[in-house]
Image: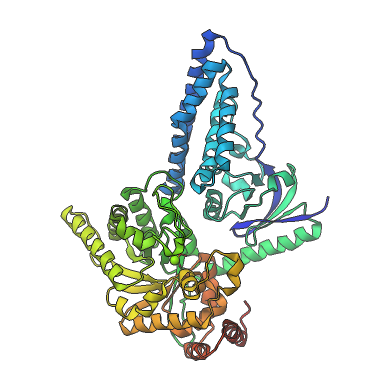
Amino acid sequence: MIERVIKGIPAAPGVAIGKVLVLDGEDFRVNKRKLDDKSLSQEIKRFRGALLKTKKEILEIKQKISAEMGLEHGEIFSAHILVLEDTMLIDDVIGKIKNEKINAEYIFLEVLKKYIRTFAKLDDEYIRERLSDISDVGKRILRNLLGTTSHALSNLKEEVIVISGDLSPSDTATMHRKNVIGFATDIGGRTSHTAIMAKSLEIPAVVGLETITREVEPGDVIIIDGSNGEVIIRPEKETIKKYESLKLKFKKFESNLTKFKHLPCQTIDGRRVVLAANIELPEEATSAVTHGAEGIGLFRTEYFYMNRKDLPTEEEQFHAYKTVAQKMVSHPVIIRTLDLGGDKFLSQLEIPHEMNPYLGWRAIRFCLARQDVFKVQLRAILRASAYGNLKMMYPMISGVEELIQANQVLESVKEELKKEKISFNKDIEVGAMIEIPSAALTSNILAREVDFFSIGTNDLIQYALAVDRANEKIAYLYEPAHPAVLKLIKTIIDNAHEAGIWVGMCGEMAGDIILTVLLLGLGLDEFSTSPIILPEVKRIIRSMEYFKAKKIAVKALSLSTAKEVENLAKKSLEDLKIKV
Ligand code: PEP
Ligand code: MG
């Protein structure tokens, strides 16, 4: 058999080499039995019993996961309970048992398959996300009807790499963590539950491989390269050797990081900058700390609103924000208020379809129009501010009136809390994300209304250069080092400093290590990026002199093209003998 490499989406970094455990093709042997009229009510009772048993099991898992991994992970199972309480599905099954006089498991499996087929065809992300919940719960109900026990994951005797169509939340919940050394799945994206779980468990994983379940046989040896999103099936001896050493390197790199993490992020000549992490889930704060983050520079909050039918409650958000604030001890945690729209859609908030969603009713524009939704989040943030060093910022500010209005809503929420005698930090720092050229160009005016800026380069670049950030056909035009982008960044930083406020960057550009020297030289005070990139940024900053970085930035601002700027930046790294 020849070695084969399959490319997927990197979900959690690291290397794993081992035997596979294929979870797909769970083969339920369901026989068809004809029932007589007398046994119909008994059969319906049996079906209801299985539903009840399944609900009990799921509630137990929910409790266990909430306690072990945090409330947000536990919340995933609320969606499962919803499936169990779906009257349409239940009535469909009961109706068919009565009419067709066939046994419950056979009818249930038929109905389940029909649901899955119909849902799979729908062009709605929320519904497609629900598919895995439906099939996960469906399998449990079937197991309970058939009286079989749950599959292999709950009782692993040796180390395995789990291969599955999708790894359901209840699969991950019941598995024996010690023995699962890697995941690979057919479906899923970077933010699928599987990927999120793998990241927080720090297990190397690749998702979105499309055909992996069909390509491997039980017992095959495979390699998971979670950093590059590759899986190598039936590797040659040489390949295994190569990856063994990569695995060691990765481990060494990781442990070197721990040694490095206490050193300050400071240039040779004493310019101190703050290194912070971008996170989407409270659990990621742990990884931020181990990678040396001195705070959370961007806590995206859209995740709370995704994959569900209802809106997140104040209580739920309060707990999540509080958890992160406490985890980061006295370090700052910047919570970004809801930034829905663009490529982040939330199905529970019937947002009309728009021609230009990136330029549409999104982020702060939405929040100011739907203050009922906005205020719930502001209350949660303010309440959590009593438990740590919380700050907050608004996304997509386009001008000062919008910013003043947002601050007025915040003040009204503060008044409410005061009246209710609920404690919060009255002087909570408030920032504006600068990610629209109009905000960059009027940042001298905006600076009077806030305590800090955070530059959102992902959007700033797309709006400044008129390049859709998600369109791969024009990706070559998406140039962070474009002279126009540099000029905007310089304007923002200079205006902020003149007004006496600090300025960070939380767009991906802050983690583009070729450009670190440039951003440092432009005077950026805080770099916020994925935890895993932080040590590299720190290494560069610690090898540099600020006065030299400033000179490089001045030179860069005089250049005509992104290519020239990049070459200058690369050369400065070579001069420092830094390989990137
Ligand atoms: C940005 O636009 O740079 C940013 C950090 O926000 P998001 O990527 O969430 O739009
Ligand atoms: Mg943005």
How many marks the image carries: the answer is 0
Residue 175 visible in the current orientation: no
Residue placed most toward the observer, 154 or 406:
406
Quarter of the image where one finds residue 139: top right
In this rendering, position of residue 309 left or right of residue 213? left
**Residue 160 rendering spot, x and y as whole percentages:** 66, 46
**Residue 354 rendering spot, x and y as whole percentages:** 44, 57
In this rendering, position of residue 486 left or right of residue 398? right
Find the residue positioned furthest to the front: 355
**Residue 41 rendering spot, x and y as whole percentages:** 49, 13
Residue at the (56%, 28%) spot, across then down: 111
Residue placed most toward the observer, 181 or 492:
492
Quarter of the image where one finds residue 491: bottom left
Residue at the (61%, 86%) spot, across then down: 571
Residue placed most toward the observer, 472 or 505:
472
Q: In the image, ligand 2 is in what quadrant?
A: bottom left
Residue 252 visible in the current orientation: yes
Find the residue positioned furthest to the left: 419
From this view, report whether residue 154 is shown above or below residue 35.
below
From this view, report whether residue 227 is shown above or below residue 578.
above
Residue placed most toward the observer, 384 or 302:
302
State the colouring used for the structure image.
rainbow
| Quadrant location, the C terminus | bottom right
